[in-house]
Image (tube, grey):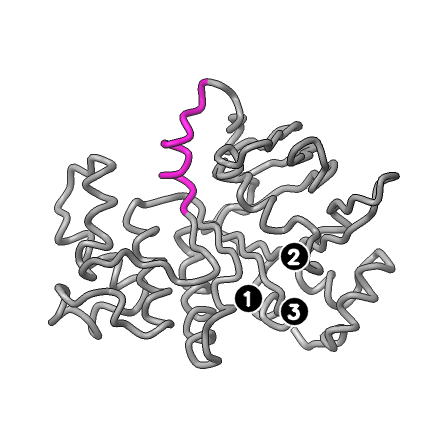
Amino acid sequence: MLSYYPIFEVKDLSVQYNQVYALQNISLEIYRHQIMGFIGRSGCGKSTLLRCFNRLNDLVKGAKITGSISLEGQDIYDKNFNPVELRRRVGMVFQRPNPFPKSIYNNISIGLKVNGYQGNIDEMVEYSLQQVGLWDELKINLNRNALTLSGGQQQRLCIARAIALQPEVILMDEPCSSLDPISTMQIESLLRELKQSYTIVIVTHNLKQAARISDYVAYFDVEFDQFGHRFGYLVECDRTEIIFQQPKQRATIEYVSGGNVLKIGF
């Protein structure tokens, strides 16, 4: 039986770039073995927030984060929390497939070696490819250059690469935006299966996709400060059926009804 308790707790989080706010006062919880979807118009900080969960914003010059994000009760921005260990526990899949220009096998094995994996690498490569439905397709040619795969196969390989490190959470920044409809449906089906083993946080501009695959949805919008700078804020976060059928905030109602999914059946 799965336990639906918070794996991440975000409290009063704000993000600035060069002293200009990108996000202000975000508080929400992300539950284990659930898919959390982030929706909202462009520029509302969805991807910025996503990158906070594995501290990728630390690598951005001029970035400043206040508030807290706790992973199973431990503040990930505490000076004693190793960001390398965090990124092992919290994997990332980006908007466009980004396989290494190496063999299929090496795309997965290289991360294991770098992280000092002590198990059988061949077995983990097979396991990871099986998890994403690629093993039967690719097992006879693991030395094939990953860049020769189709876009959908490349994205599933990138997910397999993240899975190989056995993370607790997988972050996904619009993972289907560059894929065709068939590949998109394959990824969505895969995500529904993966949540049995992982917690997934996905940014998507596709409202129907968010409605199909998410268990919870957080809707973000933008405001402008006194100097005309836009920043994102959280409007509301709830079960997917609530956000799309009975949202509490007018801004959410207007956004999801504009996407023609307000009365989608669950």
Q: Earlier in the sequence, mark 1 or mark 3?
A: 3
Instruction: Estimate the spatial distance between the alpha carbons at disc 1 and disc 2, rounded to whole Å.
Output: 10 Å
Tell me the element at label 3: helix
Contact between labelled residues 2 and 3, with CB atoms less than 8 Å apart: no
Q: Residues within 10 Å of mark 3 (few under 14, many from 20)?
A: many
Q: Which residue is mark 2?
A: 217
**Residue 79 at x, y percent in the picture:** 49, 18
For the view shown, which residue lies furthest in the top direction? 80
For the view shown, which residue lies furthest in the bottom direction? 182
Q: Residues within 10 Å of mark 1 (few under 14, many from 20)?
A: some
Q: Which residue is mark 1?
A: 213
**Residue 194 at x, y percent in the picture:** 40, 59
Q: Can you say which quadrant of the picture contains the C terminus?
A: bottom right
Relative horizontal placement of residue 118, taking residue 244 as reference (left or right): left
What's under tag 2, amino acid-wise?
Val
Image depth: mark 1 or mark 3 in front: 3
Q: From what the image shows, is residue 251 above or below residue 88?
A: below
- Give the magenta range: 80-91
210 falls in the magenta region: no
Tell me the element at label 1: helix
90 falls in the magenta region: yes
In which quarter of the view is residue 157 placed? bottom left
What's under tag 1, amino acid-wise?
Ile
Q: Which residue is mark 3?
A: 207
